[in-house]
Amino acid sequence: MTTDYVLLISYPPDLEEVVFGRLFLTPSKGNVSGEVLSAYFDNAADRDAAADALRDLPVTLRSEQRDRVDWLAHYQQSLTSLFIGRTFVVAPDEKLLTSDRPHRLVIPQAQAFGTGWHASTALSIELLEETDLRNARALDIGCGTGILSFAMCLLGARKVIGFDIDPDAIGAMEDNRRRNRTPASFFIGMLDSLRPTLFDVVTMNILPEVIIPLLPAVLGQVRGSLILSGILRSQRDEIIRGLHLVSERESGEWWAGRFTP
């Protein structure tokens, strides 16, 4: 039988957001909560790297190997709706969209970064809610599942383009575009694949080490709002240096900001 490499983590209750936030940045395949948190990995190297990322915290770590868990069964048991901001509800299946909130999205949880269930995605949507997207031209850099592209469409954007460098993401993007019946356009590539143009709103829900090198080129294409997320609170000052911050949000150890040129 195939093996899972498991990291067992015991931590004080006030560190839950920090532990989950750091695990999100690892190749963990999933977590199971209980008296001890079990994080699952494909190999021992990924598990040990995750342990190293937690060693500066007052936590207890232990490694195990187990027979592989049926994650599909866990997923099916976890189906529920998520409410974001004032107007959005996100669910992994259309049948679960029972809320009367006006902006409704179907994004399966078993997909790439950006299902709505991570704080950085929710913070981005909250900032989009306060942004005037009526008839806007918008760009979603590192779009993952496409959730921010779809949110911008629902908020009134006239044209939305999303792209990612991960070739495996295109299937999720297109499947979700059909699920949500939105006119967003997607491609796999880099920023320089686009013709020089100005966008009213640009989102980047990716890691700071990706955001910072791209900022000079991105800022040249923003004429309205730039929303940056996927950032730890401890990295806030590094991100905002030299930018015009007009609004910000926090959740646990995660931070997001909206900027204007």
Image (cartoon, rainbow, N blue to C red):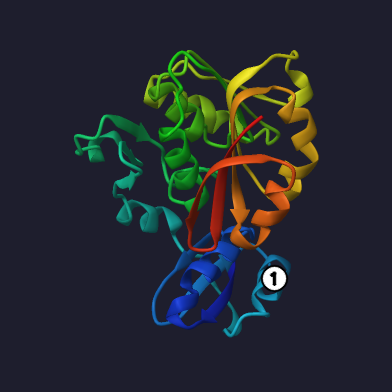
Q: Secondary structure at mark 1?
A: helix
**What residue is shown at x 43% (from left), y 30% (from top)?**
151
Position of residue 85 in the picture relative to residue 246 (left or right): left
**What residue is shown at x 79% (from left), y 23% (from top)?**
192
Mark 1 highlights which residue?
A: 44
Where residue 123 appears, as percent x and y from the top left, is: 47, 46
Where residue 113 appears, as percent x and y from the top left, is: 55, 45
Q: In which quadrant is the C terminus drawn?
A: top right
Q: Closest to the observer: 9 or 248?
A: 248
Position of residue 93 in the picture relative to residue 238 (left or right): left
Quadrant of residue 84 within the rendered picture: top left
Where residue 219 appears, as percent x and y from the top left, is: 72, 29
Quadrant of residue 27 within the rendered picture: bottom right
**What residue is shown at x 54% (from left), y 69% (from top)?**
18
Quadrant of residue 232 within the rendered picture: bottom right
Residue 172 can be seen, yes or no:
yes
Where residue 251 appears, as percent x and y from the top left, is: 47, 58
Tally of numbered tags: 1
Q: In which quadrant is the N terminus drawn?
A: bottom right
Vertical relation: 229 (above or below) 9: above
**What residue is shown at x 47% (from left), y 83% (from top)?**
12
Q: Closest to the observer: 192 or 37?
A: 192
Vertical relation: 59 (above or below) 211: below
Position of residue 87 in the picture relative to residue 6 (left or right): left
Residue 2 can be seen, yes or no:
no
What amino acid does circle 1 point to? Answer: Ala
Vertical relation: 157 (above or below) 149: above
Circle 1 Cα neighbour tier, 10 Å, few/some/many (<14 / 14–19 / ≥20): some
